[in-house]
Image (cartoon, rainbow, N blue to C red):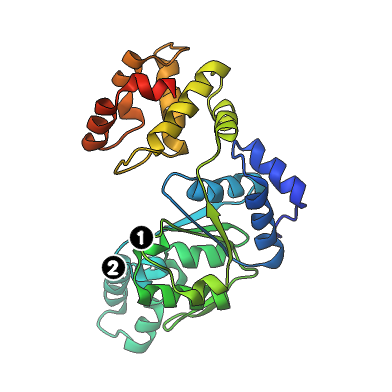
Amino acid sequence: MERPTLSQDELARSLEATGYLADPELATTAFLAMRMGKPLFCEGEPGTGKTSLAKALGQALGLSLIRLQCHEGIDAAQALYDWDFGRQLLHLRALEAASDGHLDAEQAEKSLYDERFLLDRPLLRALRTAPCVLLVDEIDRADDEFEAFLLQVLDESSVSIPEFGEITARQPPITVLTSNRTREVHDALKRRCLYHWLEHPDLTREVAILHSRVPGIGDALAHQIATAVRGLRELELLKPPGVAESIDWAGALLALDRDVLDAQTAARTLGAVLKYHEDTDRVLAAGLENLLAS
């Protein structure tokens, strides 16, 4: 299977068809990353649509999405491959039983490192599955050593497994790296990528996103939600709401059969948009009436 080739306009329309409304700059950068065969590095505040972009690309291109979720302490084994030690042990015992005490140790060792015992982790699975979309999510949570390892894998699109041999992708996966900028990612990795900083959408685009992702929402309610969420983002909150929270809030209000966002309903449904008790207290203290009137 070859990687799909779309024009810039076709890619933008395909993303829109999935419900992801990319601005022209992001659509252009994503197109160039695919055309030039470079990873796309997306940085920005949480909730601006970085992870959703990778998911939308997979849907738009008809490719599987393989996600590597980074975290503190992640290492190469967790990202690349491992051996199924349980099955290897059972296999060894079966060989011993069948050999009647005459087990050839060298042949037995070779048989332990067979394809059937190899466990693909996300990076190896992406290399073997390509074309696919590889999402390396929140690379800023990983440490410097893992970043250097990832850089080598992306550069070569291949890995060497000592007991098994070298595995090379037929073509590099379409790679999207995301960062919430909890720390600076090294320049060496950024230089190999096309870069885009994602902002929260403006009012018009957020309303359009709500219409796209929440079927049946009225224009007035969509505007009220988008306006209120923009007001929340201007407050000093521990976790300002992203687009996902806007969509959740809209879904909650529709589930309650509301077509207008009033202060009482907003107070009862803040759990859809705010995720910290301190943020809820701060918003209630500021006055929901003022927020909805802004």
Q: Which amino acid type corresponds to the residue marked 1 in the rendered image?
A: Thr
Depth check, front residue: 23 or 138: 23
Q: Is residue 71 above or below residue 251?
A: below
Please provide percent x and percent y for residue 190.
Answer: 52, 70
Depth check, front residue: 152 or 107: 152
Residue tagged 2? 73
The residue under the point 50% across, 73% down is 189
Mark 1 Cα shell of 10 Å, populated few (<14), some (14-19), many (≥20) = few
Depth check, front residue: 129 or 88: 129
Residue tagged 1? 182
Q: Is residue 128 above or below residue 240?
A: below
Label 2 and label 1: CA atoms lie apart by 15 Å
Q: Are marks 2 and 1 in contact (CB under 8 Å)?
A: no
Please provide percent x and percent y for residue 217.
Answer: 54, 19
Depth check, front residue: 159 or 59: 59
The residue under the point 53% across, 63% down is 126
Between disc 2 and disc 1, the foreground one is: 1
| Res. 273 visible in picture | yes
Mark 2 Cα shell of 10 Å, populated few (<14), some (14-19), many (≥20) = few
Q: Could you tell me which secondary element the residue under label 1 belongs to?
A: loop
Please provide percent x and percent y for residue 251.
Answer: 44, 23
Q: Which amino acid type corresponds to the residue marked 2 in the rendered image?
A: Gly
Q: Quadrant of the C terminus?
A: top left
Q: Quadrant of the N terminus?
A: bottom right
The residue under the point 50% across, 18% down is 221
Q: Could you tell me which secondary element the residue under label 2 belongs to?
A: loop
Please provide percent x and percent y for residue 274.
Answer: 32, 34
Q: How many marks?
A: 2
